[in-house]
Image (cartoon, helix red, strand yellow):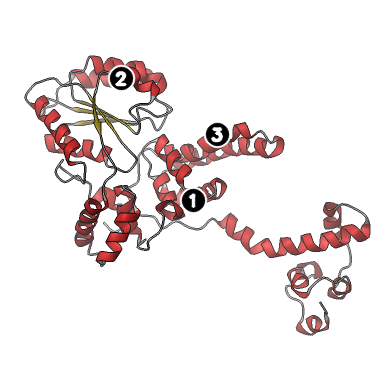
Amino acid sequence: MKNTLYTFTYAPKTIVECTGNDEARGVIKTWALDWQRDVIQKPLLIYGPTGSGKTAIAQALSLEMDWPLFNLDFTTAIDLDKLKQQLTSSAQSIGLFSKYRLFLIDEVDGPLSRGIMPLLTLLAKENKQPIIFIANDAWDQKLSSLRTLCKLVEIKKINSSSISKTLHSIALKSNLQLSEEEISAISKNSNGDIRAAIVDIQSGQFSERDKESDVFKTVSKIFKAQTISESLEIADTADVDLSLLIRWLEENIADEYEKADEIAKSFNWLSRADVFNGRILRKQQWQLFVYYRFLSIAGIASAKNKPYYKFVKYRFPTYVKTLSTSRAKRNALKEVAEVFSTLLHCSKSQALEALFLLPLTPQILSDLKINEDTIAELSFLFGQEKIPKKTKSRIKS
């Protein structure tokens, strides 16, 4: 249980166990009971912000009603013919122990759902089984035809007091020593996102802060995102530069994903994204940025076959760490190159190349009024790790 994600371990098994949105949960439960009485109902279109528990409610309903769950989302491209076959066979078959099965169709407002909307609309018209569509925005233009065929149920952000009760329960079950102040801070800081709050208490993030500013949690949420639009929304609201965020994801792909094909897909999407990034930098074609963002973030999020319900301690990007440790050295080279470009009447790039050809010594650099710290950083030009102390003592700023 230690390495299992709490959002999976403590997922609700009944509608009552779900947190918040009491009225909406009551509507959903009544809808299910009508089906159980053989009264055919319109499909539900459950909508609301990320992390509010939309999918968790639907999954809990299937467990409570003992309905086999047919789960579909648009995190990857869909084989239309295969999907039609699955939907037809599922709708016509009856389970051995249950008269009904639940169709849970997530991400219907996602970018990959547009081409399949006619099929979803047809499914909603001819439904003989309980169907739940899930979206972040029920008023998305491409959902207009589907929306008229469904009963809409809005799931709102969960208030902090309800989140606190859930966190208390999880803390007790997991033997976590959390104070009232820590639980209250996490609850308020979650901004209605119960999934983020649960991830916080497992990761040990107890300090009060803006939730998007924590890059560790952002990386975790993108890796474990169940839809493309969710992963993009997380990246867009994160208080971290996109390029740096991608470095974090790149560093931790092999730690998060366990299957070779998932890791390969992730790096394949990153390589494609990098092609667009190169074009942007070379030709300043910033209109391509949308492709760079989509291929990198959504590509990595969708590379998994299914989410991993384990806890991962993510590592700081090695590439960024290397750049940080060499920053002083690069700044020193730049400073000296500026001096030599003036003396040699050449460009800074040409002067930089000349530095590795000239017989430099600490004394020469000192005579050129280069400060001692800069000379120390350039010790690799003198063929030694460090400048001897007695040599440094002779250098004057």
Calculate the distance from the C-alpha at mark 3 to the C-alpha at mark 1.
Answer: 18 Å
Q: Nearer the viewer, residue 11 or 384?
A: 11
Q: Are the residues tagged 2 and 1 within 8 Å (C-beta)?
A: no
Give the residue displayed 61% in from the left and 35% down from the top: 276
Amino acid at pointer 2? Leu
Amino acid at pointer 1? Asp
Residue named by callout 1: 239
Displayed quadrant of residue 155: top left
Residue 187 is left or right of residue 235, and the answer is left
Residue named by callout 3: 290
Give the residue displayed 32% in from the left and 60% down from the top: 185
Give the residue displayed 40% in from the left and 53% down from the top: 211
Name which of mark 3 and mark 2 comes first in the sequence.
2
- Picture layout, residue 17 above or below residue 64: below
Residue 116 drawn at (x, y percent): 37, 20
Residue named by callout 2: 146
Secondary structure at badge 2 equals helix
Calculate the distance from the C-alpha at mark 3 to the C-alpha at mark 2.
Answer: 28 Å
- Picture layout, residue 257 above or below residue 227: below
